[in-house]
Amino acid sequence: MHSPTPDTARAEASAAGADPLQRERDHLASSRAALRAMREEVQSLDLRDVTGTWVSAAVLRNQIEQRVIALADLAHTPLFFGRLDYLHPVGTDLAAPPADAPAQGAGAGERFYIGRRHVHDAVGDPMVIDWRAPVAQPFYRASRKDPLDVERRRRFGYTGGELTAYEDENLTDPDEGDTRSALLAAEIEKPRVGPMRDIVATIQPEQDEIVRADVGGTVCVQGAPGTGKTAVGLHRVAYLLYAHRERLARTGTLVIGPNSSFLQYIEQVLPALGELDVAQATVQQLVAHVEVRGTDDPRAALVKGDARMAEVLRRAVQSGIRLPEEPCVVVRGSRRWRVPAWELSEIIEELRGRDIRYGAAREALPQRIAHAVLVKMEQGGEAPDDRVQDAVARNAAVKAVVKECWPAVDPVKLVHRLLADPEFLAACADGVLTADEQQALRWAKPARSPRTAAWSAADAVLVDEAADLVQRTPSLGHVVLDEAQDLSPMQYRAVGRRCTTGSATVLGDLAQGTTPWATGSWPEALHHLGKPVAHVEELTQGFRVPLEVIAYASRLLPAIAPGLAPATSVRDTPGALAVRRVSGDLAAEVVEACRAALDSEGSTGLIAADARIPELARALEAAGLPFLDPGAETTADARLTLVPASLAKGLEYDYVVLDEPAAVVAGEPDERTGLRRLYVALTRAVSGLTVLHTEPLPEQLTGA
């Protein structure tokens, strides 16, 4: 593989009598000028002559504003990162030519520059191809074994937005051997300052297969630390919006993350890829029917998150349905029309047996009763129409039957009663939950009203389930669920309701499950999500975490996830791991380790058990080391983040200082959860990990 540094690239170009690097720079400059022209053309559009209503004009104006933003040229973001030289014109039949056909020489194909967005010149010819376009796919998939008609793949290196190097892979040259791309490695290992970056220039073949999977199917990705599963999920959203824009514009897309810090960390990825309208939320934000002010003990949370609660809630919702004992008598003018109790009971039983929401059935009940009245009116010689049926459905006698037999249900009040009234809970949970489980559910001191209740996060999910039983939750076109291993079955159901008619991308790592209800297997999780036939992909090759670090963390796998294969890494960087026992002041040693890490380029994360965060914050302040909270954007002047272990999941730092692993384990309700929390903390480093401790390390790490 041809891998020139900037100096060697210039030297080779000079020897050839031309400067290919300068030609590439010229194309970059021309492409930037073309992008500016595209943006100016959109900005110059005159909407005064647009026909239609003021609403359509406002919609069009908003679309133009969004288009202008999408066409922004980001100074430090390369407009293109690669080039494909095809052997033949794209679309040509590549069947073997006749034996007497003249040979095609080099350059008979086409050349395409691959970038984050499409750019064309004044006559519409492409200068940069969007990475999501079919013609760009071989940039990620072509290999020496299967070149996909690509003669040469060129990668570009940039420094501060300036094109400084290029590197070629001549895929059809039998004399060229396989070597690791230096530019690809440099991009992957680039120091991390600021929020998460896109990986569009470094997507690997196995990642690209997931990114471009069909929108109609749900994909589950089991990804070890550093395999890029979160980035893959975000790039999949960008690809689906490109390939199915009209469909997803109607139905919507949503990215669900574990917490607000994580969402802040990833929020710049999609805008950098030109996608501005993707919503982001946590599960708690999705189910915000009540204000969460309380917490559950692990036992109560485990029961509330159990899938059996769906049946308990179904019974609770339907508990108010009654069969009538009296007929319904409707007075119309001088005549009285009587629907007997047995007929009303048949209508109610038929509605209860149908697979429709409680609220929809309640809305249908008065119409069904009115229809029964109209049948009797026709039998009596009258000729009623639809207006009469609607009038009968609004009759006071019909409304009284509906109110008595199919009462309205308020989901918040229903769950409040379920958790506060032991007799009601016992009736709804009979044969579903044990007496001990019911005891765990009940509030010790029930609030007088839903408004004053100390609702927990698990309670909010129960309210969401009840709300869906009453009125169907609208479905989105595609949902990305990250860190999915931590969800309870009821939380999976809450997410699944948001994509019943759409698809999902589920991302997670079973070894990083740190909740008492963490899923035991992906088939189980996908069943609760309502996507049992989803395809499960496993990513085990890491690109970010150094091999020495991931190998050290993987010592925990037999104890925390015995069925998972240990992850590997393409980054073999000796000296990336340091483990040191401290005999004196641990906080002081931690501060000095942070100071040493900050001497290197990039971000530093200090991760510690939640209980030790206040002490370490005071030590950092006393030492004059400024630090950020998780999720806050790092800058050149503020590169240290103090991270509670409970919030470390999904975050990455160039250098990590890990304080007292034993305290991280002890901070969880059980050893397995604690070891999983430690596994997360150990795998946040991209360039180097320093572990400092005074207490003995967990025996699963030492092998003792």
Image (cartoon, rainbow, N blue to C red):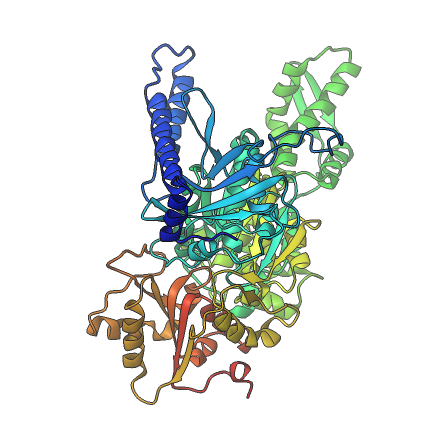
Give the quadrant of residue 387. Answer: top right
- The residue at the point 59 percent across, 24 percent down is 394
Q: Which is more toward the observer, 560 or 190?
A: 190
**x and y percentages locating residue 540 in the rendered image:** 59, 62
**x and y percentages locating residue 516 in the rendered image:** 55, 68
Vertical position of residue 19 compared to residue 305: above or below: above
- The residue at the point 63 percent across, 68 percent down is 565
- The residue at the point 72 percent across, 36 percent down is 351
Q: Is residue 556 visible?
A: yes
Vertical position of residue 477 compared to residue 205: above or below: above
Give the quadrant of residue 479. Answer: top right
Vertical position of residue 239 compared to residue 91: above or below: below
Q: Which is more toward the observer, 668 or 278?
A: 278
The quadrant the C terminus occupies is bottom right
Q: Is residue 279 left or right of residue 616?
A: right
Q: Is residue 637 left or right of residue 60?
A: left
Q: Which is more toward the observer, 172 or 559?
A: 172
**x and y percentages locating residue 627 in the rendered image:** 27, 64
**x and y percentages locating residue 573 in the rendered image:** 45, 70
Q: Is residue 390 left or right of residue 65?
A: right
